[in-house]
Amino acid sequence: MPKKITIEPVTRVEGHGKVTIQIDDFGNVKDSRLHIVEFRGFERFVQGRPYWEAPVLVQRLCGICPVSHHLAAAKALDVIVGAGTGNGLTAVGEKMRRLMHYGQFFQSHVLHFFHLSSPDFLFGIDGDPALRNIIGVAQENRELAIQGVMMRKYGQEIIYHTAGKKIHGTGAIPGGINKNLSLEEKELLLNGADPLNADKMVEWSVAALDFFKSYHAANKDMVDTFAAYPSNHLSLVREDGALDIYHGVLRAVDNDGKIILNDVDYQDYDKYIEEEVRNWSYMKFPYLKHIGKEKGWYRVGPLSRLNTCDFIPSPLAQKEFELFKAYTNGKPNGMSLHYHWARLIEVLHCAEMIRDLLKDPDLQNDDLVVKGEKLHKGVGVIEAPRGTLFHHYEIDDDDKITLANLIVSTTNNNQPMNTAVNLTAKAFMNGKPEITEPMMNAVEVAIRAYDPCLSCATHALGQMPLEMTIVDGNNNIIDNKIK
Amino acid sequence: MSEEIKFKIDGKEIIAKNGQTIVEAARENGVYIPTLCNFKGVKPKGSCRICSVKVNNRFMTSCTTPASPGMEVYSNTDEISDLRKSIVELLFVSGNHFCPACEKSGNCELQALAYKYRMMVPRFPYSFKKKGVIATGPKLLKEQDRCILCQRCIKTIKDVEGRRYYAFRNRGNKLEVVMDEAMSKTISDELAKQAMDNCPVGSIIYKEIGFAEPIGTRKYDKKPIGSDIETN
């Protein structure tokens, strides 16, 4: 008998979503969808506000990676106040922002790997649900849990000393930054008491990567085949092709590694990217205009960044990048669970960048802000932990915002997550007489690999669970699970 | 008649100059009584009521009540604190005081009073009026949803000839403070910054410098409101 499975809420992700899976008369998965059921409307209510409020106001989209929104908005406003992009800021302005961003990346990736995903690796996808959480991790592997907590704390401390608050700070302002890093702060972050210092973070980042690599080696087939599929990939890259999460040009590659968006200036993003609306989700579906809706969708995030960049400009992460690239003979990697691998390489990169940046004397400079001739439009793009994040603002002559358009990282990954859900549902549920909890967790594992932030993606507030529903061929609900 | 008079606030002896109001005398004797509409250079009018105290078992505004010999004044009691808290709550619900994205956060007297009186959720329903932002001038904007109609800008921000930059417009519940559009174009930097400083809330904002002063370094981030007056 045909049926429909609902997983609602999807757990251990940021935000509230649900999955529906349609099963036909023969017990095979006919279709599946990841629905995003939150709605917020930040783009609308920021209209009419003074432009300089945007970095502080719009970051309230999220409590996990508000720094990304804070910085993307500030970058857009840099253009509006005439400071330009990239090198337009003073050295201390750009470097303080970079430090803030590396700290943010570090804590967000660590949160995702240790708190949200490590339970799946430690206990298995079919492990006891009562243990499959961070408390279970702490009971099973105390050292791993402590590392996760302390690494996140370190990232948050970096944010505190650069943005003024651990969550929702005000550090980045149009044209620069509102504070530099004092020598006391530098000393605290660089050489703080064990374990909260830069060298320990590099050491622990290597250990986290080793943990994943051991898991990979022991579960190669599963990790390499789980929701693996070909796709395009998009990210910012530095102009010389290096991984750069703060600034660069937009590059997209196809599944063969062919460049399909060739290092374009993100001020013109709307020439290249379009968003499609579908009636069953509040999350839009972006795609590359010149390729079209069907084939122009792309993945973003850690996996995509390592697929688009040519090298990583920090030595330990570069070594790991070379291993990562060699695994697919230099071709783009389409394996969803390799997102975790790529994410941990980025954790190591951020730890190295934080350590090196903290030694830079420019952070103690006093020339915090630059301004030039005011413009009425600005676009800021940044690599958020979950992928490429677009902020676009337009203002009137009275300095009030007239238009805001946000394409959030998770929105870019909408079609990829739907594809991953579909593949996983088929792999785990096709022809099975009964749908079990581990099968449903497998679907969640596929979503979780993308580290989606569903509240950001729909710009929502409130509780953030995920739901899964099974329906029959006539759309009758057969099973419904809310976690 | 003696130049000095003595009275008590919460049992503490206060020595006041003849003709001083309760709030002035309290301030000089190290006792903090909160004020909003009361401001140096502005004739006291007792409109915001936040300085209410109890004198001879009656509520009086301490900014308009002269101190008199032997007077027994009560200020720091549970009843009066709750009254002041309710006034702060009323001011919050009658506007849209969204502190997280307000440039005045940390320097805002209303916010500081909300912290002082531990306001959590206002007991009154929000009015959700939408008056909007007037931002036509080159240096200052006026956020009408945050204005508490205290008149401090009207009474203190004047040009060299004594002409006022701000005035009331409309009446009743449509009453609002607006800036003269022609004069707004010529206001000096110094006076514009003073207008922002004199505003007890985030209604008058100096344009384009948003959040240049980091969180944690602002006036009430360092010390609670009134701590510069209180001596014990």
Image (tube, coloured by chain):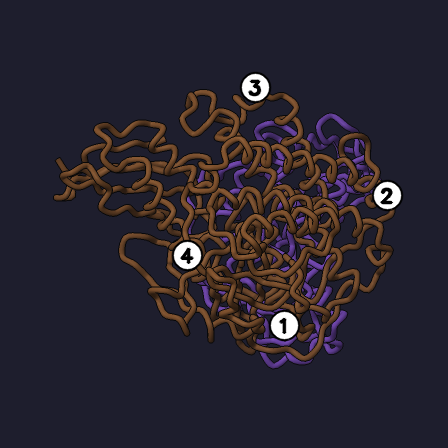
Crowding near the residue tagged with mark 3, few <14, some 14–19, many ≥20 C-alpha atoms within 10 Å:
some
**Circles 4 and 2 on the same subunit:** yes
Q: Earlier in the sequence, mark 3 or mark 1?
A: 1
Q: Nearer the viewer, residue B53 or B131?
A: B131
- Do the residues at pointers 3 and 2 share their chain? yes
Q: Amino acid at mark 3?
A: Glu
The residue at 25%/47% (across/down) is: A31
Q: Which chain is brown?
A: A
Q: Which residue is mark 1?
A: A79
- The alpha-carbon separation of the residues under discs 4 and 3 comes to 42 Å
Q: Nearer the viewer, residue A465 or A47?
A: A465
Q: Tell whether label 3 touches label 4 (CB within 8 Å).
A: no
**The chain in purple:** B
Identify residue for label 3.
A140
Which residue in the protein does label 4 denote? A41
Determine the chain carrying the residue at label 2.
A
Q: Cβ–Cβ below 8 Å for labels 4 and 2?
A: no
Q: Residue furthest front?
A: A329
